[in-house]
Image (cartoon, rainbow, N blue to C red):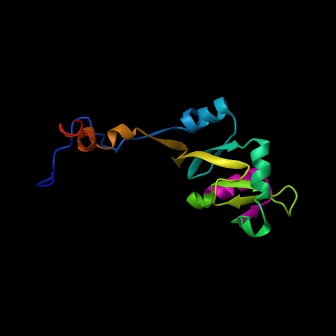
């Protein structure tokens, strides 16, 4: 045992609240089934995508004047390929829109203004997706004390 190492707080998780569960039972997969959209799994990420209503999709595609139009990160030839490529961009890619110049192709975007938008993602490892119970990450009284107002705050 290490010297001068503080004891583990009772109730704190040894794995920092991380739990790995089958992707079929992960909340992201359930959200996709209940609320619609698409769930895409890659070797590193499990993500839920939602399609914007047609009116919003049309506005996102138009994007105003040509000079105001967001420049695509890249163009994918299919919807599924676009979603998978977007996940490889990690946080740099947040949505996709129909390509205005290449019929049937999809442009990957940094912003969330595209027709398909990433809603939630979880890390994947060995076919299981990470589920984190954030309440076990930090001992509550460490940050709850900052929320307590002094007695003379309301007079």
Residue at the image position 15 percent from the left and 49 percent from the top: 6
Q: Nearer the viewer, residue 85 or 108?
A: 108
Q: What stretch of residues is rendered in magenta? A: 74-87
Q: Nearer the viewer, residue 68 or 95?
A: 68
Tell me residue 96's x, y (percent). Answer: 71, 54
Q: Is residue 125 at all visible to an observer of this figure? A: no
Residue at the image position 28 percent from the left and 41 percent from the top: 147
Q: Is residue 64 above or below residue 122?
A: below
- The majority secondary structure of the magenta stretch comes to helix
- Residue at the far right: name it: 103
Q: Is residue 73 at all visible to an observer of this figure? A: yes
Q: Is residue 53 left or right of residue 31?
A: right
Q: Nearer the viewer, residue 112 or 68?
A: 68
86 is within the stretch colored magenta: yes
- Residue at the far bottom: name it: 67
Tell me residue 95's x, y (percent). Answer: 67, 53
Quadrant of the image occupied by residue 85: bottom right
Tell me residue 118's x, y (percent). Answer: 63, 48
Q: Is residue 130 left or right of residue 23?
A: left
Q: Is residue 62 above or below residue 27?
A: below
Total labels drawn: 0
Q: Is residue 155 left or right of residue 104?
A: left
Q: Nearer the viewer, residue 25 or 66?
A: 66
Tell me residue 84's x, y (percent). Answer: 67, 54
18 is within the stretch colored magenta: no
Quadrant of the image occupied by residue 90: bottom right
Q: Is residue 152 left or right of residue 46?
A: left
- Residue at the far top: name it: 34
Residue at the image position 79 percent from the left and 43 percent from the top: 54
- Residue at the far left: name it: 4
Q: Quadrant of the C terminus?
A: top left
């Amino acid at each position: 045992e290490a010297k001068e190492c503080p004891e583990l707080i009772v109730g704190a998780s040894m794995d920092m609240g991380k739990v790995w569960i089958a992707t079929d039972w992960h909340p992201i997969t359930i959200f996709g089934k209940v609320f619609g959209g698409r769930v895409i799994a890659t070797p590193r990420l499990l993500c839920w995508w939602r399609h914007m209503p047609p009116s919003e999709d049309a506005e996102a595609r138009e994007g105003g004047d040509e000079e105001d139009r967001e420049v695509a990160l890249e163009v994918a030839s299919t919807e599924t390929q676009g979603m998978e490529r977007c996940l490889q961009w990690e946080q740099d890619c947040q949505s996709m829109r129909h390509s205005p110049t290449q019929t049937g192709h999809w442009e990957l975007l940094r912003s969330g203004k595209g027709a398909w938008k990433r809603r939630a993602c979880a890390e994947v490892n060995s076919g299981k997706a990470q589920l984190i119970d954030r309440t076990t990450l930090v001992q509550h009284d460490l940050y709850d004390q900052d929320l307590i107002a002094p007695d003379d705050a309301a007079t």
